[in-house]
Amino acid sequence: MRISLIIMCVTVFLVVNTYYDNKFTKLFHINKKYIQMATYAFVGLSLYLFVKRNPEGSKSMFKHANDIVKCINDKFITTGNEILKMAIQDMLEELAPNLFEENLERLVDFGHTFSATLEMHDISNLLHGEAVAIDICLSSSLSHIKGILRMDELNKIIKLINDSFLPTFHEKITPKLMWESIKEKKLHRDGFQRLPLPVVIGKATFVNDIKYDEVCMAIDLLKNLADKLDSAKKNH
C-alpha cells in the first residue's frame, strides 16, 4: 500500500510539473544555493554538538573519519546514519531546556562567534556551514593559545574538518575583522564575550577575557596548521 501511494504521488507530481512546463523542478535549480547552505549548516551544527556532547563517540569518529565520510556519501548508511541520529538527539537535548535563551552560555554558539562576519564578507562564495567549520577551527586554536586545549586535540579537530571536505581557513580572516566580530557578539551576549572554547573533545568552557593579541596568535597558528594540511594533500 505504501509503495502504491508513493508511485501515485510521484506520478501526480510529474503530471502537474509537466503541465506547468517543469516549473517545480526548476525551483530546485533556482534555490540550489540555499539548499546547499541549509545542508552545510545542519551538518556543521550537528558535528560540533556531537563533539561536545559525546566524547567517546566523537573519539571513535575521529579514528574512523575517512570511513564515516564514505558512509555519508553513501546516503548515511549504517555508521553515518547512527551519527546523524545521535547529533539530532543531542541538539534537541541541548536546546530544549533553554528555549527562551535565559542562559546565554550556550554550546550552540560554538562555531557562531566569527562565522557570521566571515560569511558576510564573502557572501558569494562561502556557505554558512563552511563558515561555521572555519569558526570551529579558529575557536579551537584560540583555546590552545589560552592554554585550555592540548595541541593533539586541536590537530584532531582540524583534521576531522579537513577530512570532511570542509574548509579550515579563509583568506578573509584578519585580526581586525575577527576582533570586530568578538565585539559585535558581546552586544548579543549581554556585554560579555561568552566565547565557547573546547577544553577537550566533548567538553567546553566559556571565557570572557579574550585579548586582541591572542586572536592574532590564534590566526597565525590556524593558518600554519591549515597550510600543512594543504601541503600534505598535494603531496599525497
Image (cartoon, helix red, strand yellow):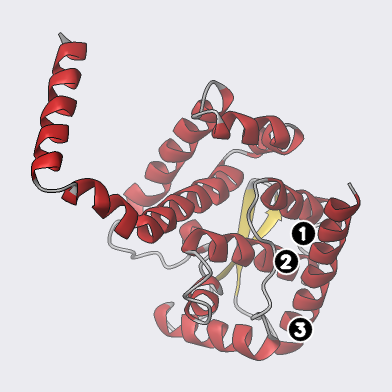
Q: Earlier in the sequence, mark 1 or mark 2?
A: 2
Identity of the residue drawn at 68% across and 68% down: 138
Q: Please, is residue 134 above or below residue 123 in the view? A: above
Mark 1 touching mark 2, by CB under 8 A? yes
- The residue that appears at 87% across and 61% down in the rendered structure is 228
Q: How many marks?
A: 3
Would you name the residue on which mark 2 appears? 143
Residue at position x 55%, y 77% in the image: 118
Residue 45 spot, x, y in % from top left:
49, 52
- Which of the two marks, 3 or 1, is nearer to us in this view? 3
Of marks 2 and 3, which one's residue comes earlier in the chain? 2
Q: To which residue does mark 1 refer?
A: 149
* Dot 2 and dot 3 residues touching (CB under 8 Å): no
According to the picture, the residue beneath numbered tag 3 turns out to be: 216
Q: Secondary structure at mark 3?
A: helix
Label 2: few (<14), some or many (≥20) within 10 Å? many
Residue type, numbered disc 2: Ser
- 115 sits to left or right of 59: left
Residue 56 spot, x, y in % from top left: 67, 33
From the top left corner, tell me how far across and down residue 21 is, in percent: 14, 48
Instruction: Describe residue 109's horizontal placement relative to residue 169 as left or right.
Output: left
On screen, residue 102 above or below 15: below
